[in-house]
Image: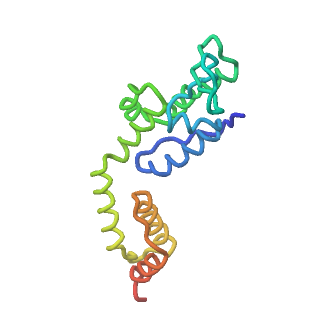
């Protein structure tokens, strides 16, 4: 059963959050929607009756369109639904970069490439974020809540880039970042 909740709008600045929200949103639309994004359009299959079953499992072949049931048509259309959902989230500039993609999987992968960059870009982002972490200090006039929000955001950014600090390291960093008073 489809859930028609508000589609998370794309923001390059909040890409990591958007990606998580989109994964949840697409999976909520249909149990198999996320497989369309990760594996590509679903193939509608049937057992191959032209060959004998030897190992207990029938070999599968694609059904012709004329053989599709209503359920098959819904599954085959999931790629179109996913593409439509992804298109609706994008601004004009981002859409112009991915509109040549033909499947939802291609759109997703191209979008990640645009927003996250290649391995060198990711490595550079990680280096910058780690430097920010090492140099982090509570600012004069900053409240604990403001510092906590800034600190948590930085730790989340590092985690998204593949760097995990242990609880002990995080606690020590917080203690060093706070002013003496």
* Residue at 46% in and 62% down: 156
Q: Nearer the viewer, residue 108 or 57?
A: 57
The spot of residue 3 in percent (x, y) is 68, 37
Q: Indicate the quadrant containing the C terminus: top left, top right, bottom left or bottom right.
A: bottom left
* Residue at 40% in and 76% down: 138
Residue furthest top in the image: 66
**Count of numbered badges drawn on the protein:** 0
Residue 77 seen by the camera: no
The quadrant holding residue 137 is bottom left
Residue furthest front in the image: 54
* Residue at 38% in and 75% down: 139
Residue 70 seen by the camera: yes
Colour mapping used in the image: rainbow
* Residue at 61% in and 16% down: 50
Q: Nearer the viewer, residue 50 or 13?
A: 50
The quadrant holding residue 132 is bottom left
The spot of residue 177 in percent (x, y) is 39, 79
Q: Is residue 119 above or below residue 169?
A: above
Q: Is residue 139 above or below residue 91?
A: below
State left or right for residue 143 relative to residue 55.
Answer: left
The spot of residue 176 in percent (x, y) is 39, 82
Q: Nearer the viewer, residue 178 or 125?
A: 125
Q: Indicate the quadrant containing the N terminus: top left, top right, bottom left or bottom right.
A: top right
Q: Is residue 22 above or below residue 152?
A: above
Residue furthest right in the image: 1
């Amino acid at each position: 059963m489809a859930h028609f909740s508000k589609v998370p709008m794309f923001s390059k600045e909040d890409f990591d959050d958007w990606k998580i929200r989109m994964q949840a949103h697409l999976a909520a639309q249909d149990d198999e929607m996320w497989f369309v994004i990760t594996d590509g359009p679903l193939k509608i299959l049937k057992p191959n009756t032209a060959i004998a079953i030897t190992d207990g499992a029938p070999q599968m072949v694609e059904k012709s369109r004329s053989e599709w049931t209503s359920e098959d048509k819904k599954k085959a259309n999931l790629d179109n639904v996913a593409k439509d959902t992804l298109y609706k989230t994008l601004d004009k500039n981002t859409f112009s970069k991915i509109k040549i993609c033909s499947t939802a999987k291609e759109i997703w992968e191209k979008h990640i490439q645009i927003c996250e960059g290649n391995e060198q870009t990711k490595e550079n982002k990680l280096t910058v974020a780690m430097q920010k972490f090492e140099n982090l200090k509570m600012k004069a006039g900053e409240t604990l809540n403001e510092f906590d929000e800034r600190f948590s955001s930085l730790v989340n950014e590092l985690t998204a880039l593949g760097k995990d600090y242990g609880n002990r390291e995080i606690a020590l960093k917080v203690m060093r970042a706070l002013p003496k008073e």
